[in-house]
Image (cartoon, rainbow, N blue to C red):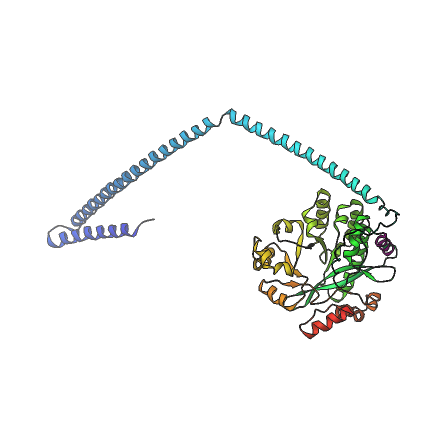
């Protein structure tokens, strides 16, 4: 493409040569043809001069570009040479001994994996043999008390027995035959009652969850508290049957609660003996598998000591429940030495801590974390803190300073049984509403005293 400057130069040269011919024709006696020849000669001279000057200028520019290109090529060649020397040095260091070391590492890893798999097989065999021995020990009948004459009273006088808390039964020792007879009769007659105690939000005191509290009825129809029959049932190997019946009843109660409130959830306690007994747990797992739709709302609760002393069998059973979507809760916490990350990995989503433990300044001073930070720490791992055994309003005020979101205790409501009419017709929403009236959380002051007096009656 012709540049504008070139066109301008050409026009100027034509004008100059034409002006020169016109001047010669006007001022001299030259003829027009002669003046035209002179003008054409001048134009030719100007064209040659412009061409020569342009060529010389272009040559100088090209020479500079060629010099720059030569310098760049030299630099590139120097860099390529340096890169080649470095590559040769790396290749010289990568020799056959390294490949041999790699082969030795691979063979060592394979042998280690083989040993680990063998150890896993041995551990599984050991767990199976321990489970068989536990089943054999659980199947043994309880030893009958010797039929001997009572010895004379000793010279020393025993200290008076501590008073039992209100609402518990003064039953004999766990090894006494009457307790075992009552347990067996209750299992055979299916006279296991489920009492519900609400877990409320703080400070609103709105019922959020329910906990199922188990009661047995003796021959006279009096309720038998869990603390009075569980040790004897575990010693006699009957806890598995009780837990299976309780879980079935809890599932039935949960379905009735969800007819009124689809977000209702129920805490159901499971004993350590059931978790460690393969035969009893197999029946429990079969029922929970069949009712897997209730997994998000049926929360299985274990003692803190149970999760601390998990063996191979218990860990396997707990993982099987977690794989089926069931969530866990921990109660009977005596200290706060726990790892929230490990608990969350096992499926724990709730931790119940007694209000007295959270508010005990002497015991919490020796803890690794301040009580005000416990709720936030557990919340980072998806675990909710529930303060249980709340008995007075002062405890509620102090717990609110620790950002505790849930509470449970006799201050809000005592464990109460289902109403007979509500249990008889679960499809009737009007009758099912009677469940809610039994578990409304308590208010303060006179309302608390009235509700407590009603529970004692």
Q: Quadrant of the C terminus?
A: bottom right
In the picture as drawn, the residue positioned furthest to the left comes out as 28
Q: Percent from the top left, x then y, of residue 283?
A: 81, 49
In the picture as drawn, the residue positioned furthest to the top comes out as 96
**Left or right: 365 as drawn, with respect to 445:** left
Query: Where on the picture, by quarter, is residue 313?
Result: top right
Residue 245 lies, with reference to residue 263, above or below; the image says above
Q: Percent from the top left, x then y, of residue 349?
A: 66, 55
**Magenta stretch, overall SS:** helix
Residue 79 lies, with reference to residue 278, above or below; the image says above
**Left or right: 48 as drawn, with respect to 286:** left
Q: Nearer the viewer, residue 109 or 422?
A: 422
**Left or right: 385 as drawn, with respect to 180:** left
Query: Where on the picture, by quarter, is residue 59?
Result: top left
Q: Residue at x 79, y 49 (%)?
A: 234
Q: Which residues are magenta?
A: 177-186
Q: Residue at x 71, y 34 (%)?
A: 122
Q: Residue at x 78, y 45 (%)?
A: 278
Q: Percent from the top left, x then y, of residue 220?
A: 87, 62
In the picture as drawn, the residue positioned furthest to the front comes out as 155
Q: Residue at x 52, y 27 (%)?
A: 98
Q: Percent from the top left, x then y, of residue 159?
A: 74, 56
Q: Nearer the viewer, residue 260 or 214?
A: 214
The stretch drawn in magenta includes residue 145: no
**Callout count:** 0
Residue 337 lies, with reference to residue 133, above or below; the image says below
């Amino acid at each position: 493409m012709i540049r504008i400057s070139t066109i301008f130069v050409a026009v100027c040269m034509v004008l100059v040569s034409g002006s020169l011919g016109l001047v010669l024709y006007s001022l001299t006696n030259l003829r027009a043809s002669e003046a035209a020849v002179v003008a054409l000669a001048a134009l030719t001279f100007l064209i040659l001069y412009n061409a020569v000057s342009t060529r010389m200028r272009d040559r100088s520019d090209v020479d500079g570009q060629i010099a720059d290109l030569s310098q760049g090529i030299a630099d590139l060649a120097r860099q390529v040479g340096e890169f080649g020397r470095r590559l040769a040095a790396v290749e010289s260091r990568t020799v056959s001994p390294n490949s041999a070391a790699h082969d030795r590492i691979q063979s060592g890893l394979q042998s280690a994996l083989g040993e680990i798999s063998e150890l896993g097989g041995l551990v599984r065999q050991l767990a199976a043999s321990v489970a068989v021995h536990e089943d054999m020990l659980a199947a043994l009948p309880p030893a009958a008390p010797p039929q001997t004459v009572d010895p004379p009273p000793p010279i020393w006088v025993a200290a008076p027995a501590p008073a039992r808390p209100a609402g518990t039964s003064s039953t004999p020792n766990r090894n006494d035959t009457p307790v075992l007879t009552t347990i067996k009769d209750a299992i055979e007659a299916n006279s296991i009652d489920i009492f519900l105690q609400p877990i409320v939000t703080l400070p609103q005191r709105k019922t959020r969850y329910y906990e199922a509290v188990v009661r047995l009825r003796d021959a006279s129809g009096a309720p038998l508290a869990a603390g009075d029959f569980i040790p004897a049932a575990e010693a006699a190997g009957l806890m598995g049957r009780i837990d299976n019946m309780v879980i079935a009843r809890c599932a039935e109660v949960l379905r009735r609660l969800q007819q009124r409130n689809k977000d209702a959830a129920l805490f159901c306690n499971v004993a350590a003996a059931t978790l460690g007994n393969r035969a009893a747990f197999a029946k429990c797992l079969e029922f929970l598998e069949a009712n897997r739709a209730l997994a998000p709302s049926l929360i299985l609760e274990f003692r803190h000591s149970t999760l601390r002393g998990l063996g191979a069998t218990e860990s396997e059973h707990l993982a099987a429940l977690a794989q089926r979507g069931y969530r866990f809760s921990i109660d009977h916490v005596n200290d706060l030495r726990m790892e929230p990350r490990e608990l969350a990995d096992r499926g724990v989503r709730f931790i119940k801590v007694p209000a007295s433990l959270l508010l005990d300044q002497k015991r919490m001073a020796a803890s690794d974390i301040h009580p005000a930070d416990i709720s936030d720490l557990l919340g980072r791992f998806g675990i909710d803190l529930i303060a249980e055994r709340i008995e007075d309003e002062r405890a509620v005020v102090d717990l609110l300073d620790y950002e505790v979101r849930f509470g449970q205790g006799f201050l809000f409501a005592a464990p109460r049984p289902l109403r007979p009419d509500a249990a008889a017709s679960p499809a009737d929403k009007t009758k099912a509403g009677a469940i809610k009236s039994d578990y409304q959380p308590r208010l303060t002051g006179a309302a608390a005293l009235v509700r407590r007096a009603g529970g004692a009656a």
